Amino acid sequence: MFAFFMATTILFSCRSLALPVPVQDSVQRPARQIDNGGYAFITSIAPKAGGLGTVLTLEGANLLDKQTEIKVGDAPCAMDIEASSSITVLCTIIAHTKGLRHVSLRNSLGTAAVASNVIFEGTDKPFISSIAPNTGGFGTLLTISGKNLIEGRTDINIGDVPCAIDIEASSSITVLCTVMGHINGLRHTDFALKNSLGQAETGSGVFFKGTDMPIISSIAPATGGYGTLLTIHGRNLIEGPTEIKVGDTPCAMDIEASSSITILCTVMGHLHGTRHVSLTNTLGTTEPVDFEGTDQPIISSIAPTTGGYGTILTISGRNIMDDKTEVKVGESPCDVDIDASSSITVLCKINTNIPVGHHQILLQTATLGMVQTDDILFEVKESEETRKEDGTGNRN
């Protein structure tokens, strides 16, 4: 009886400890490879330079699982799952990249360790291949073609003049912008597009020529002289420092009353005869426009009205003095005292004998011409004719 009990117990125990035989799965699954202590590791990349669209091959260990993400700097690299494995991953850079960038991979094992020689150089740069039109000025709508043109903040300047980008109509390969200031002359090296990838390089045929010039279309009045308020019409008249002249005479601009198409200025000197009105600003100098100066010397009176050798004559009027004013009494010179004279008063001394009789006064200026009196006469009486030319004024 005891023997039967022991045999039954042993048989039951043996059956309880029997191990099940594993059944082979119908689908062969690859074993998970765990190397390098169970972490991901990048040993190499190829190529080592490129940009948007570059297909990158990463080699190493434990690279691929369902959580694998790859970046080149901040640029995502989209993985090709079908072509990748635990030791080789292929991905495509889907954003612009420039300069030296670290390649990073992260999966369920954490962030991959990277060999020291694994570095990638982003070669994306903005490039301008063409501009249309290549001439124009303020308000011109430009079409700029190239690549990598819009990336982050994008600025376009032609020299110091900004070109305002139409963001909605622009793309990475085509930018539309409007010139926001006046431009004159050839601008090649001054044409600049800058974005987060750097400053654009330009093709050899890329240039822009500014055609803005100051132009005077009319002036009013067309005649006048000192103090005349001149109204000048045209375009591009005020741009940077602006100077107006009538001949060599400045015309002082009223800044507050002036604009790019109309300027008011006051003639600041005497004018006689035909003079050219010209305007110069940062865009250039206008073609000359004729203005007739009507300033001329006018004698209103003389004192004294009688005398002779040694008499100091005071001539009153307007526009009668410049640095080369000459006076004659009849045919005899009257020496001008420049320091004591002005535009309205000239003092001169008779230093020669003058024949008895009535004599006209002739006054000649260098800039405003000549005046000769008809009804204002200087009389030399018989007693005055005999004065000696010794400067004493004493009679014989």
Image (spheres, rainbow, N blue to C red):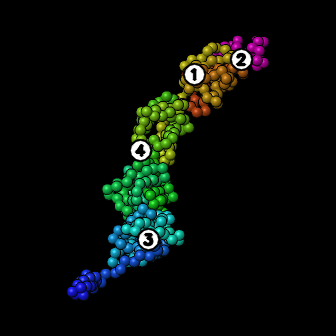
Disc nearer the start of the sequence (3/1): 3
Where in the figure is residue 250, as x and y percent of width and height?
Answer: 53, 35
Label 4 and label 3: CA atoms lie apart by 72 Å
Q: Residues within 10 Å of mark 1 (few under 14, many from 20)?
A: some
Confirm or deny contact between disc 2 and disc 4 (CB under 8 A).
no
Task: Give the residue type that dot 1 points to.
Answer: Ile
For residue 373, the mark is none
Label 1 and label 2: CA atoms lie apart by 22 Å
Q: Which residue is mark 1?
A: 344
Q: Is residue 1 above or below residue 106?
A: below
Q: Which residue is mark 3?
A: 39
Q: Which label sits in the foreground, 3 or 2?
A: 3
- The range drawn in magenta is 375-396
Q: Which residue is mark 4?
A: 235
Asked where in the image residue 346 lies, by quadrant, the reply is: top right
Asked where in the image residue 10 lies, by quadrant, the reply is: bottom left
Query: Which residue is at the front of the view, 220 or 265?
Result: 265
Disc nearer the start of the sequence (1/2): 2
Task: Give the residue type that dot 4 points to.
Answer: Arg
* Residue 8 in view of the camera: no
Label 1 and label 4: CA atoms lie apart by 39 Å
Label 3 and label 1: CA atoms lie apart by 103 Å
